[in-house]
Image (cartoon, rainbow, N blue to C red):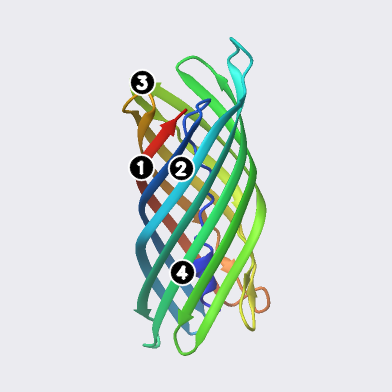
Amino acid sequence: MKKLFALLLLPALAFAGKISENYVGVQIGSTNFDFKYSETGVSVSTDANEFSWEFSANYNLYQPSAEKYGTDLSLSYFNGSGDDSAKDTNGNTWTTDIEISTFTLLLRPYYDLGGMKVFVDLGLLHKDIENDIKHTSIDNASGDSSEFLYGIGFELFSGKFTFTPSISFSKNPDLKLTNASFNGNDLISYHLPVAYSYSENIDITASYRICDNDAFVNSTTNTSKTEVNRSSWGIGIDYKF
């Protein structure tokens, strides 16, 4: 049942690219999974840091001529994995092998205030998580769900640089194990992307994301829980068209 912790780390990626631009992009980087698990008489914490990548795209769906408002259609696909091992308080070694993928599809209404654009995110977040755990036995905790996602953000631009921070809110899926389940919980994601306009058609991008979860609790006993923090960074390029 301890494996559930891993699944919660899934990112709620609401890709916050450049508002009102048409582009496709890719980033590669690293994701850190920092989690703790505890139940009566047992606790363990592990820290995994592995490769991750993301594909994203943005299309200016609607913007009346000469108006300061409009709507973008944005999508992104993220995949990250990690493995780590540590001993619990009883001296047993736990090995975790986690893979998480998310697909996000958003409508992004925005308004240009002059020097800054503000926007909201409204859409769908689909999450798929697989977590294999080896300790005193071999377990698998998995979960997938499609959840409503909403968020807010703003975009600042100066010269060739664009900064588009945002915060989004969604839910994690329930985690299913052989003999137990853990209730999904609230998920808050903070995203800090920066873009540098290298040429008319190419942007160089970098981003940092933090996902903050409430504790996941065993739906039957309420005596075991996990806390998960996830952070990731990436660098890449966008092609504008």
| Front residue of this view, candidates 153 and 222 | 153
Q: Earlier in the sequence, mark 2 or mark 1?
A: 2
User: Can you tell which quarter of the image residue 204 is in?
Assistant: top left
- The total of numbered circles placed on residues is 4
Q: CA distance from mark 2 to mark 1?
A: 15 Å
Residue depicted at 53% across the width and 70% down the height: 130
Q: CA distance from mark 2 to mark 3?
A: 19 Å
Q: Which residue is mark 1?
A: 236
Q: CA distance from mark 4 to mark 2?
A: 22 Å
Q: Amino acid at mark 4?
A: Ile
Residue 235: x and y in percent read 34, 44
Residue depicted at 61% across the width and 43% down the height: 105
Q: Which residue is mark 4?
A: 98
Q: CA distance from mark 4 to mark 1?
A: 24 Å
Q: Amino acid at mark 1?
A: Gly
Q: Which residue is mark 2?
A: 191
User: What secondary structure is marked by label 4?
Assistant: strand
Residue sitting at the far top: 66
Task: Give the label on residue 158, or none.
Answer: 3
Residue 224: x and y in percent read 56, 76
Which class describes the residues within 10 Å of circle 3: few (<14), some (14-19), or many (20+)?
Answer: few
Residue 195 sits above or below residue 81 on the image: above
Q: Earlier in the sequence, mark 4 or mark 3?
A: 4
Residue depicted at 50% across the width and 86% down the height: 138
Q: Amino acid at mark 3?
A: Ser
Badge nearest the viewer, 4 or 1: 1
| Front residue of this view, candidates 62 and 185 | 62
Q: Amino acid at mark 2?
A: His
